[in-house]
Image (cartoon, grey):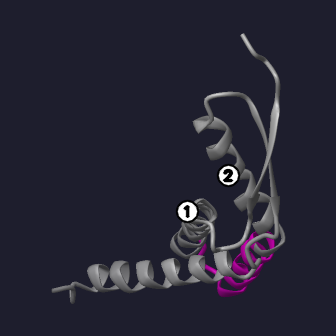
Amino acid sequence: MDLSLAAVDFDGTLGNPVVRVAVTIWAAVLGILLIVVFTYVRRAWQRLFLTFLILAIGYGFSRIACLGLAASYYEATAKKPIGVGFFGGPPPWVAPLLALSLAGFAALVLGRRARGTAP
């Protein structure tokens, strides 16, 4: 049994489909947090503060989270143990922007459903 560790470097930009999926997963996590904040926090200033906090955390940890998810995928699907590295990385603003889009869409859908104007 060969237990040698191979090191592989992948493209970490959005040109890599695995990184695209990882960015989408990270955006979904941030979006769900935003939906929870907008659903359960009643005071406007607390909502605003928590929204900026979630977006700042999303921006700050975007590269680490996305490349960590992508590396986990590569390591889980490898036949032999590998060490995964990336050159480059996704832009840090993509996941928070997608999260805001998800939260906005959910607000439209849930708001219409709550008012009874949904088709």
Q: Amino acid at mark 2?
A: Leu
Residue linked to disc 1 = 21
Q: Position of residue 20 (x, y in %)?
A: 59, 68
Residue at 82% over, 23% down? 4
Question: Which quadrant is the C terminus positioned in?
Answer: bottom left
Q: Is residue 65 above or below residue 78?
A: below
The quadrant in which residue 2 appears is top right
Q: Is residue 13 above or below residue 3?
A: below
Dot 2 lies on which element? helix
Residue linked to disc 2 = 69
Residue at 75% over, 81% down? 52
- Dominant secondary structure of the magenta stretch? helix
Q: Is residue 59 left or right of residue 104?
A: right
Q: Is residue 59 above or below residue 44?
A: above
Residue at 69% over, 79% down? 51
Q: Amino acid at mark 1?
A: Val
Q: Residue furthest left?
A: 119
Q: Position of residue 100 (x, y in %)?
A: 58, 82
Q: Residue furthest front?
A: 2
Q: Residue furthest top?
A: 1
Q: Is residue 55 shown in magenta?
A: yes
The quadrant in which residue 105 appears is bottom left
Is the residue under label 1 in contact with that under label 2 (CB below 8 Å)?
Answer: yes
In space, the residues marked 2 and 1 are separated at their CA atoms by 9 Å
Question: Which quadrant is the N terminus positioned in?
Answer: top right
Span of residues in magenta: 41-58
